[in-house]
Amino acid sequence: MDLPKLKIGRIEVEIPIIQGGMGVGISWENLAGHVAREGAIGVVSAVGTGYRHPHLVKRDKFGRPIGSVNTHHPEALKKIIRDAKEISKGRGAIGVNILAAITDYGRVARDAAEAGADLIISGAGLPLKLPEYVEGYDVALVPIVSSARALNIICRTWKKRYNRLPDAVVLEGPKSGGHQGFKYEDCFKPENQLENLLPSVLEEAKKWGNIPVIVAGGVWSYHDIKKFIEMGASGVQMATRFIATHECDAPQIYKELVTNLEKDDIMLFKSPVGYPLRVIRTPFIEKLLNGFNGWNGCVSHCVVPCNKGEEAKKVGFCIADRLGLAWLGDYEEGIFISGANGHLLKYQGIISVKELIEILTGRRKDHTLERMEALKV
């Protein structure tokens, strides 16, 4: 089966794969640019961009960006987007993932549009005002949802307030890395698994003019991509497999970590954002599980639901601080994220983006599937 092209608004790419946004610092210009260069959609994370270009921002004595404007820094994000576009050499498309929960959400969305992002992907809350923030810019808008009901709310709201609809929608199931759109116990229910959510979301999308539906969360292989496209999806979003690429912006220790995981090393954990967070068991996570509180005060004011550190204090860590430490390569104190299938990366190893795209489009053998079959994973 030849995979179809993916069309989102004015954007059309050869390969129906969106590389998921991963922050802090896992998907910035190098990864996103090289994914786009292969004919897919590369996505820059807008979270914590002050860490990428620290010379542009005001920091405390520990190197942490001070305040939201420095954490999610305008010029840092714009430079990342422009550099990604330069790396892509005009192929594919460059998107930006912006969590709806971040402080200064509207300003960051406008920063992305001003920098020339081809699309904005937005979840971790319903982005009900997103069209307002990018008014006047030719940028495709793609909300992330976890149900048909959420898509209905977004479509009704956008249509009434702004007379526009999403250019596509990402349906994310509960096997993704990072923050989930479900309560902890709901992540494991059969009715909330991606293949069971898709039919109702496709039906809802059809009511609003056949909005393209992109599936995400646990999509792993060419076989998975074919399956979901045959079910009616227009494409897929994948993140975790891209961590184990040479071009990924993550530090080398992160890449080595994800290529040496066992299934039990990946778990759901409480987050200051208010959603379950899928993380890798590392020394800092183990300390938290044993009752340690590693909160060191709110410096970055990164997400609204944290209430300037009140929620971080309860769960024992600041998400911006700990993801920032992971970006800086601190294995002992950082928080590292993986999707539910991340343990399969030990069968892939660290490869190039070009090789991975060839695997995902069926042009190269997938050794992770061979190993899964041999071990009956």
Image (cartoon, rainbow, N blue to C red):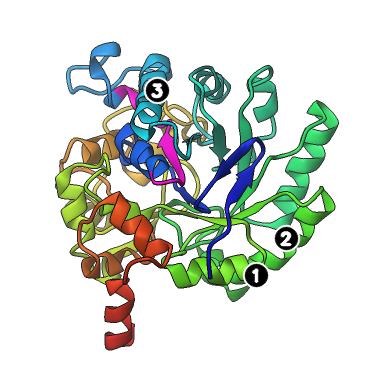
Q: What kind of residue is marked 2? A: Leu
- Give the side of residue 295 with respect to residue 97, left or right: left
Residue 81, position as x, y percentages in the image: 41, 26
Q: Earlier in the sequence, mark 1 or mark 2?
A: 2
The mark found on residue 82 in the picture is 3
Residue annotated with mark 2? 202
Residue at 34% x, 25% y: name it: 83
Mark 1 element type? helix
Specify the quadrant of the image occupied by residue 85. Answer: top left
Of residues 81 and 356, which is closer to you in this image?
A: 356
Mark 2 element type? helix
Residue annotated with mark 1? 231
Confirm whether residue 9 shows in the render.
yes
Q: Earlier in the sequence, mark 2 or mark 3?
A: 3
| Gap in angstroms between the C-alphas marked 1 and 2 | 9 Å
Circle 1 or circle 2, nearest the eye:
1
Specify the quadrant of the image occupied by residue 110. Answer: top right
Q: What kind of residue is marked 1? A: Met
Residue at 80% x, 55% y: name it: 206
Residue 65, position as x, y percentages in the image: 30, 20
Is residue 65 one of those drawn in magenta? Answer: no
Q: What kind of residue is marked 3? A: Arg
* Residue stretch in magenta: 38-50
Is residue 48 one of those drawn in magenta? Answer: yes
Residue 6, position as x, y percentages in the image: 59, 50
Asked if 266 appears above or below 333 in the picture, the reply is: below
| Gap in angstroms between the C-alphas marked 2 and 3 | 34 Å
| Contact? badges 3 and 1 (CB < 8 Å) | no
Specify the quadrant of the image occupied by residue 189. Answer: bottom right
| Gap in angstroms between the C-alphas marked 3 and 1 | 36 Å
